[in-house]
Amino acid sequence: MALKSMSLKSTLRPAPLLQLLLLILLAMAVLVPLLWLVSTSLKGPAEDIFTSPPSLFPTQPSLDAYGRLFRDNPLWTYIFNSSVVSFLAVVANLLFCSLAAYPLARMRFLVGVLCWPLLWQRFLSLSRW
């Protein structure tokens, strides 16, 4: 019954509306370049990507650029190399962070005593998400 008495004016406060507007602007700032990227990649060889004024939608969409990407470049080698580097970075991070975490958890020293409250505060702030 209390919900019915709430007016539209009390539910639409300026702070959430401003926040929503800011989020919409940020979403557009992220999505418009992605749309431009996909649109440009679909333009055919006859279309100029540097026309003025720029056209967002291609007049003759084509997937030829993607065929040339896989045919002319060793893309799978690049993906494999990136995967190997990423895997090794994760393994090294786990190794070195584990080596650093052990003394913080098991040994008593001044830096460890000072670091624990900071670490717990960080973990608790992440648990709210």
Image (tube, grey):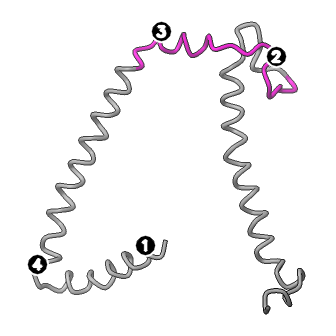
Label whose residue precedes the other's in the sequence (1 or 3): 3
Quadrant of residue 35 in the image? top right
In the image, which disc is placed on residue 126?
1
Instruction: Determine the CA span between mark 1 and mark 2.
Output: 48 Å
Mark 4: give few (<14), some (14-19) or many (20+) Cα within 10 Å. Answer: few
In the image, which disc is placed on residue 106?
4
> What amino acid type should be assigned to the residue bearing mark 3?
Asp
Label whose residue precedes the other's in the sequence (2 or 3): 2
Q: Quadrant of the N terminus?
A: bottom right
Q: Is residue 45 left or right of residue 83?
A: right
Q: Are marks 1 and 3 in contact (CB under 8 Å)?
A: no
Label whose residue precedes the other's in the sequence (4 or 3): 3
> What amino acid type should be assigned to the residue bearing mark 4?
Arg
Label whose residue precedes the other's in the sequence (1 or 2): 2
> Helix, strand or loop at disc 3?
helix
Q: Please tell me whether mark 4 or mark 2 is closer to you in this view.
A: 2
Q: Is residue 5 left or right of residue 70?
A: right
Q: Is residue 91 magenta?
A: no
Instruction: Determine the CA span between mark 1 and mark 3.
Output: 45 Å
Q: Residue 2: x and y, percent?
A: 79, 92
Q: Are marks 4 and 2 in contact (CB under 8 Å)?
A: no
